[in-house]
Image (cartoon, coloured by chain):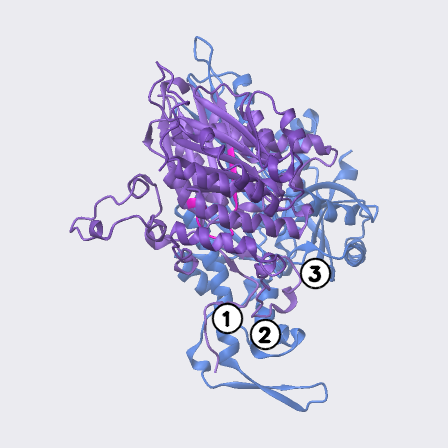
Amino acid sequence: MNEPNPSEQQRPGTPPATQLAVIGVGGAGGNLVSLLARVPWPGLRCVALDTSWRTLQMRSGVETLLLGRSVLGGLSAGGDPKQGRAAAEASEAELPALVSGSDMVLLLAGLGGGTGSGAAPVVARIAKSAGAVVVAIVSMPLELEGSRRRRQALLALNRLREEADVIIPLSNQDLLDKSDPGMTVPQLFSAANERLVEVVTAWWRMLALPGLMHLDLGALRAATSGRGVECQLASAEAVGNNRTFEVWAQLTQNMGLGESEFWKKTAFIVAGIAGGEDLLPAEIEWLSAQIRQQAPQANLVFGVACDSSLQGRLLVTLMLSNAGGRDLEVLLPEEQTPESSGRSEPAPVSDLETQSFLPPATQRLPSRIVPPPPAVPPEKARQLYRKQGVRSRGKRTGAEQGMLPLEVVSKGRFDKSDPTIRDGEDLDVPTYIRRGVTLN
Amino acid sequence: MFKSSSILVGLEIGTTKVVAVVGELSPTGALSLIGIGQCASRGVRKGEIVDPVQAAEDVRAAVAEAEKNADVEISSVYLGVTGGHIQGLTNRGVHQIVSVDRDITEEDVQQVIQNARAVVIPPANTIIHTMRQDFMVDGKPGITNPVRMLGSRLEVDVHVVHGNDNRIKTAMRVVQGLQLRLDGVAFNGLASALAVLTHEDKEMGSLVIDLGAGVTEYVVYAGGLFKHTGVLAVGGDHISNDLAIGLKVPLGRAEELKIRYGSALTQPELKGQTVNLENEHGLHVRTINLEHLNRIMALRVEEILQLIEADLAQSGWLDHIRRGVFLVGGGARIPGIQQLAEQIFQLPVFLGRNGSINSIQSTQDQPEFATAIGLVKYGSIQQKRQTGWLERFRDTLSGLIPH
């Protein structure tokens, strides 16, 4: 573990709150971090990292660091993650200074390109070894960006998973699909960025609030671990008589969750509700009912916080994730020691276990359990990942296996019509087949 | 004025047939049925139009037949819509009474209704019906008119039926393309309920299930008010399809077998019984096991009813149904479905009879016509609402005379 850099001194008078550093890597990450820097947020350190000198010049209000001047000479990585990684590794000596003194590092990057995909795992590793908790919020490429970028993004995501503590991969595809056709490209991109900044700020507030039912990073980690996970974040705030209703309207309309295809895939929901001392149980119940109505099968983790600073207001944050909806026991971090389970009384094994607001275990579908990826010690992982870098591309990037839709049962005349799905069952398939009744 | 508008036509574009029912609204407000036209439907799947050209042709044929039978010219219709996209939801509006004397005024009532109407529905959807429920003053329910009451908090529930805008417009476009005016659009489930439920049934709490070919609609009336809507995009077609797959026969033959041998209950005495299928020359083709047929069909029918029961149990309306369950639509003719429904809902089950309109007996007993007849009924209610004060005055007068 690195010693905190002496140059980064604790300012006198600052409360011993969590020191947060936000690091934007690459073009998309840099855009986000410079937007975040405008949010009044005490104790926040904003850093933009990029390989392109020109892009860095445009960043204002944030610290900047040019990655890999010796490798790329201030030009961009050109969409090649290998270049991005090489650049970050060349600048490895300068990185610890950026994260030292921070308890938590929030890494923002758009995956799929060169710098974001290549450098973000390196930055995450360094931040982690400097003793910070690393949370990475990354946006996945849009479909229009093509399959190559998508593969690069997925590979980068897997590498990032080995380094960071919590990874929240976001999908922006919905925003594009639901956007006004008259919207121009800059408008769309800035809308996506602004939405993200708004949501990230709201989530941070939610996590910082002292909760009656506290939400912590563990809940987010539970909702985001696993392969192929994508998330959507949303937040809304409202005041007044109909605030519950307005919050939900904002969530569904402005945040684009209303008709989102994502609900169907959602298997895990983390919802945070914060209000003043006047927060009513009926309001929480109503919101919970709305959420459950949208995704009846999903695991719902609830957090409730009351704070006098929010008097009369209602702040709701939502995270939808398609993480396999599995049993929480599976999701407990591996660091849990075996002796703790030897006790006769089932001690609260993690914060998440005691504070979550989950449906009883019987409601979860056993078939959705997906075993977590095998644990690889970080040293070994790094070795593997170095090795991957040396190997020629081609084979590696094509490693993602496609899935064919598995149509076992014919639906007769309803083959081509919209399926009638209820509670996860396709009602167009004959009942006797679904119930396994044999005819003989 | 009432001469021209006294003809009301209900048009249902169903999955197996298009039905146009012509009703006559007499100046005294009595509604009688004067003609029916129907035509096999070919452009509809699961209650939704998939081939507008074909559907338009069938509508034209049905309307022409109705015109002939009723001996009137049809210029406008009430159209029924359905489909799996239609949903119902109940929303509550809240309004704080701010005046010092806590007197609830007409404006407060308007405001609270407006609050309740502002429901969140998916942006692609449009509202078909909004139905106001009873008011609540300071948490006290069951208030029909709160004006001039005292209170500090006024609440009202509104039940909203909404569906996909484009799909509803497709059906409307088909009708408009035939130079027919649209007097109104109504949800089929609501129309069926209007056709079979008496005032008392609505008051005591009833469930109406319309087992159509493409979709199954169900609505709950309780306390005289429309409370719950549900559409299941599963119907009689699914039974035929299951049989076609399970017995490995063509769809047309499956349909025939369903009508001839179908039952909603598993019958143990059918064990080992078979029926021989013959081709058009009377030659033996295959042997069908009746027990299999029975089991495939019974499972599907049972599942449909169970899904409805589960939905109602979840939404809590099951406890409000005290009168019973009314079955309409072609599926109501399945032998044994009454007993099955009684077992599942634990309530008395009736075959819906179109009691709300004067007509010849044979039409009243046909459960398939409930929706189209209900659309006429819906039209008559709408028409009464739209009439001016003069007509309303006359209605009041005629209402005093027993008829």
Chain name for mark 1:
A
Highlighted magenta segment, given as a residue range? A223-234
Q: Is mark 3 on a helix, strand or loop?
A: strand
**Residue B223 in sight from this viewpoint:** no
Q: Which amino acid does the dot numbered 3 rest on? A: Lys
Compared across the picture, whether B190 is left or right of B33 comes to left
Which chain has been coloured purple in this picture?
A
The span from disc 2 to disc 1 (Cα, nearest Å) is 10 Å
Query: Mark 2 — residue?
Result: B245
Q: Is mark 2 on a helix, strand or loop?
A: helix
Relative height, residue A435 to residue A124 (above, below): below
Chain B drawing hue: blue
Amino acid at dot 1: Ile
**Amino acid type assigned to the residue bearing label 2 in the image:** Ile
Taking A70 as reference, is B301 above or below it? below
Can residue A432 be spotted in the picture?
yes
Q: Which mark is residue A433?
A: 1
Marks 3 & 2 on one chain? yes
User: Would residue A233 be counted in the magenta stretch?
Assistant: yes
